[in-house]
Amino acid sequence: MAGRSDEAETAGQTDRGDGADAVVDLNQLFRRLAEQMACLEAQSQSAEACMAALLARAAGAEKAVAAPELQNLDRVTQTLGELHAFLRRAAEAAPPGIGLDLRSATEAVRLGALSEKLRGQTGRAAATKGSVELF
């Protein structure tokens, strides 16, 4: 593809020259999405464990807590894991050289760190353990 640098070629993307990746190969995009799903799955598992512990404490150690919300969180966690597996396989199956211009799509993503990761840029540092960042 014309206009690609050697470094961008190996990364599966085209650099516009201003540091923002404009065109990304489909298989690379699927890999990035799969990576984000894996991270969300891990965060969801952590939240699920925290919620279960809080519910158990609130109900007392001897009482079992039945919480539909906890089941929904478990479903979200499992769905993220399955989407991760699907996207990882889709990345392997996608033919190389099919590029997508992500400018418009990533402009719709309001979470800056996620938008950066989808463009292939290093994302912002995650919140440190024990800290809470509310939006």
Image: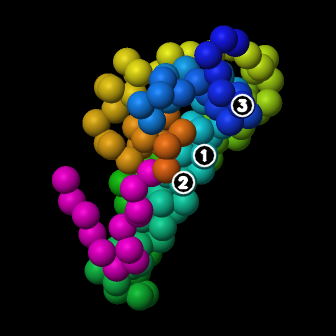
Residue at 65% across, 27% down:
5
Q: Is residue 111 above or below residue 96?
A: below
User: Mark 3 or mark 2: which is in front?
Assistant: 3
Q: Is residue 107 visible?
A: yes
Magenta residues, as a range?
Answer: 123-135
Residue at 44% across, 51% down:
123
User: Residue 39 location, x and y as percent?
Assistant: 54, 54
Residue at 41% across, 88% down:
61
Name the residue type under label 2.
Cys
Of the pair 96 and 52, the residue shown nearer to us: 96
**Residue carrying label 3:** 6
Kindly indicate whether the residue at mark 1 contacts the one at mark 3 (C-beta within 8 angstroms): no
**Residue carrying label 2:** 39
Disc 1 element: helix
Position of 33 with respect to 123 (left or right) is right
User: Mark 3 or mark 1: which is in front?
Assistant: 3
Res 85 label = none
User: Residue 107 location, x and y as percent?
Assistant: 33, 26
Of the pair 30 and 40, the residue shown nearer to us: 30
127 is within the stretch colored magenta: yes
- What secondary structure prevails in the magenta region? loop
Disc 3 element: helix
Q: Is residue 6 above or below residue 77?
A: above
**Residue carrying label 1:** 35
Of the pair 108 and 89, the residue shown nearer to us: 108
Position of 106 with respect to 74 (left or right) is left
Distance from Cα at disc 3 to Cα at disc 2: 29 Å
